[in-house]
Amino acid sequence: LAFPGAHGSRPPRERILEAILVASGEMGYEQVAVRHVIERAQTSRATFYKHFEDREDCFAQAYADAAEWLYRRMIGAAKRQDSWREGLRAALAELLEFCATQPAIAKALLVEVHAAGERPLAMRRELMERLSRALDSARREIPTRQAPPPVASDFIVGAIDTLLSAKLLDGDAARAP
């Protein structure tokens, strides 16, 4: 997947997906109109509506693609490590680097998704559950008497989301890593 943040000659759909996330991160989802997206993507209104029903559908598809791309990068970084602690550090480093280098897209994924309607919010809930399950799987490596309760992973994922959202809202994502 070349998106997000890829450069070069890309199909219009990919350019539109990136454009809605960047515009949402910069302007706020509520302020984004289809014209902002097509201007940024350098495409036509007809092309936009060939791929998407409306702005909400476009954001939902963009969220799904970008969130899955980021999830796979984080999980891939974690799996390449020897222990769950090193894996968690590697996944966090991947997430923080993404936020620092793609702050508008990160803000769209972590903050603006809350304004984008039920479909992206449902995808966000499912993603948060997947991240929590991935983190919770580390409990198998910890002696039972020392392992935290299963709900601990929910709190950790939620805390990371809250802290990064605050950094992105403050425009301070570059210092997150």
Image (spheres, grey):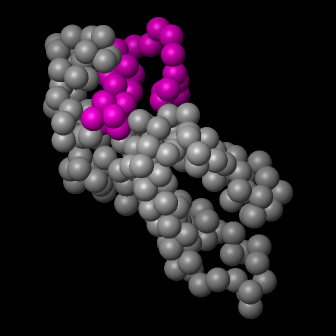
In this rendering, the answer to whether 160 lies above or below 167 is below
Asked if one can make out residue 90 in the rendered structure from this viewpoint, the answer is yes
Residue 44 lies, in percent from the top left, at 21, 11
Which quadrant holds residue 146?
A: bottom right
Residue 115 within the segment the image draws in magenta: no
Q: Of all residues shown, which one is farthest toward the bottom? A: 145
Residue 83 lies, in percent from the top left, at 80, 62
In this rendering, the answer to whether 72 lies above or below 92 is above
In this rendering, the answer to whether 162 lies above or below 38 is below
Q: Please give left or right for residue 85 compared with residue 46 in the image.
A: right
Residue 48 lies, in percent from the top left, at 22, 19
Asked if one can make out residue 75 in the rendered structure from this viewpoint, the answer is no
In this rendering, the answer to whether 119 lies above or below 14 is below
Q: Please give left or right for residue 8 compared with residue 62 in the image.
A: right
Could you tell me which residue is drawn at 31 percent across and 30 percent down? Answer: 23
Residue 20 within the segment the image draws in magenta: yes
Could you tell me which residue is drawn at 31 percent across and 48 percent down? Answer: 113
Residue nearer the viewer, 36 or 136? 36
Magenta part of the chain? 1-27
Residue nearer the viewer, 66 or 19? 19
Count of picture labels: 0
Which quadrant holds residue 47?
A: top left
Could you tell me which residue is drawn at 61 percent across and 41 percent down? Answer: 97
Could you tell me which residue is drawn at 44 percent across and 13 percent down? Answer: 10
